[in-house]
Image (spheres, rainbow, N blue to C red):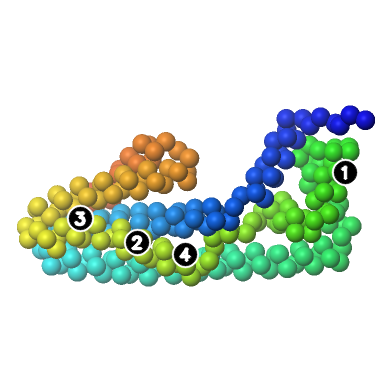
Amino acid sequence: MAKKRLTPKEKQHLRKLAEEHLCSEESAEFGGKLRQAVFGFNDGLVSTFAVVAGVAGAMLGSRVIILTGLANLVAGAFSMGLGSYLSLKSENEYYDKQLVDEQKEIETKPDIEREEVRIIYMKKGFSGKLLDKMVDKITSNKQLWLDVMMKEEFGLSRNACAEPRLLGLIMSGAFVIGSIIPILPYLFFPLNGEALKITIAFSLIGLFLAGVIKSFFTKEHWLKVGLEMVAIGAISAGATYFIGQWFAGLV
């Protein structure tokens, strides 16, 4: 008896399932860490660049600029790191709770859970013997069954890289590195005007490069994302610089 040919839609869905289960944990872990690092770097660079520009606009001197920039660095590093840690910790706790509940459902009510799998794939367009085979295959492996239910019923998947403490530290460290860039010129150049020009150049280059790396995650064109990051940094710094000048004129 000839095997039933799969439709393009069925092949596409089976391929997607295979890719999800064959994706290496090492690759997911590296990607998650790099993503956290890029976002932390962006936030640190943009926020500190804006703070430094604002204080420079107020003409308060290199010492004040350095101290203000360092204060933003420390506060931001703690805030971003703790925020990342708490967010991922909450996500993991919610996932674990749902996982335990679903595991119990599969153990105590297998017929109902099996029917749920059938309904899920009926809605995706599967029918007849192919649907029966897919349901049989999924429910014959409890781990696969559990993974499918978590993803399809609850829209949840375990992030292989989601170690809250480590990613919190990565976020903090990346924020610090990004924040240092706008501050460094003021440590080596005594004149505010010279230091500000170098800060602007270094910061915009750093933002462009960070945008290029970010484009690997967003799947957008690298030039578009790079220029967007430059624009965000330039607008933020420009606005705070002129606000600083305005406040200086009032005092």
Q: Residues within 10 Å of mark 2 (few under 14, many from 20)?
A: many
Question: Which of the two discs, 1 and 3, labels the residue nearer the N terminus?
Answer: 3
Q: Quadrant of the N terminus?
A: top right
Badge 3 is on which residue?
A: 53
Residue found farthest to the left: 191
Left or right of 229? Residue 61 is left
Q: Residue flagged by tag 2: what amino acid is it?
A: Phe
Left or right of 212? Residue 123 is right
Q: Residue flagged by tag 1: what amino acid is it?
A: Asp
Q: Position of residue 15 (x, y in %)?
A: 69, 39
Badge 1 is on which residue?
A: 132
Q: Which mark is residue 167?
A: 4
Residue, x 55% and y 56% (percent of image)?
A: 26
Q: CA distance from mark 1 to mark 3?
A: 64 Å
Question: Which of the two discs, 3 and 2, labels the residue nearer the N terminus?
Answer: 3
| Depicted 72 relative to depicted 3: above or below | below
Q: Residues within 10 Å of mark 4 (few under 14, many from 20)?
A: many
